[in-house]
Image: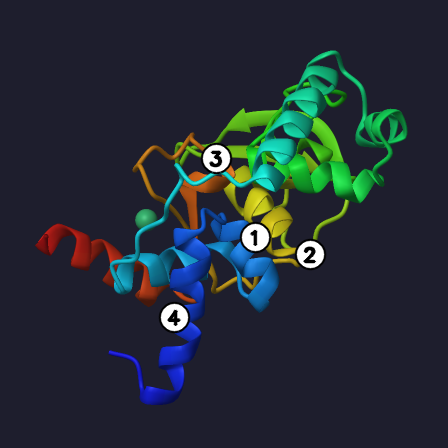
Amino acid sequence: MPKPKDEEYINRIRKMSEEGMTSYEIGAVLGKTPATIRQLWKNYGMIHNTSFKSKKDQRDLEKAALIEKMAVKGLSSAEIGEAIGLTPTGVRSYFRRYGIKAGRARGSQPGSYNTNWKGGRRINDGGYYEVAVKEHPHKNNCGYVREHRLVMEQIIGRYLKPEETVHHIDGNRLNNAPENLMLFESKSAHRKHHADMNRH
Ligand SMILES: [Zn+2]
């Protein structure tokens, strides 16, 4: 349970959640990762009111639909941004928030807007997608990094530390949609989460 000084913080998150803000948006406001916000939703039994749609959300959705249409045609984030008056980073934030697959890079996986992306993707022995990258501090000897880690790095905007672990919420190792991934600070924290889930 929260210490009294944490209550205000939790209440803020609760209010934003009830107003329909996504874990990405709340995380951006509070400087936390979406995974942290989703964990708090769970821990405190918060309602994430997806049915609430403000006018801004509606406009955002329409813009996202437009961006997706262009991305499907293969336009890059820079080209899309030019067409609708957003920076490439602004466009990529729509990619992230709405799970839009970037067009240009083949494979069109969530991480394909990574500038290091070379396009090579395969399933490794562990049953995970791994992707060929030009430069990455934690690429393996063959020059590959597991895709779910790359996607999480896109979400949090930094490289993962080796001890950090990414969990697939639906249990499907090949589902690397951003909303299916959860970040844990260590292997033991990840294991504990699995143990907790089995108890329910
Ligand atoms: Zn897991």
Say if mark 4 contacts mark 2, CB within 8 Å.
Answer: no
Question: The residue under label 1 is which amino acid type?
Answer: Glu
Judging by the rendered image, the residue that carries numbered circle 4 is: 11
2 to the left or right of 59: left
Name the residue furthest bottom.
Answer: 4
Question: The residue under label 3 is which amino acid type?
Answer: Asn
Question: Which mark sits nearer the N-terminus, 4 or 1?
Answer: 4
Judging by the rendered image, the residue that carries numbered circle 2 is: 137
Name the residue furthest front.
Answer: 55
Judging by the rendered image, the residue that carries numbered circle 1 is: 25
- Where residue 132 appears, x then y in whole percent? 67, 34
Asked where in the image residue 192 lies, by quadrant, the reply is: bottom left
Give the alpha-carbon distance from disc 4 to disc 2, as whole Å.
Answer: 38 Å
Say few, some or many: other residues with alpha carbon within 10 Å of mark 1 (under 14 / 14 to 19 / 20 or more): some
- Where residue 173 appears, x then y in whole percent? 38, 35
For mark 4, give the secondary structure.
helix
Give the alpha-carbon distance from disc 3 to disc 1, as whole Å.
Answer: 20 Å
The residue positioned 38% from the left and 71% from the top of the image is: 10
Question: The residue under label 2 is which amino acid type?
Answer: Pro
Judging by the rendered image, the residue that carries numbered circle 3 is: 176
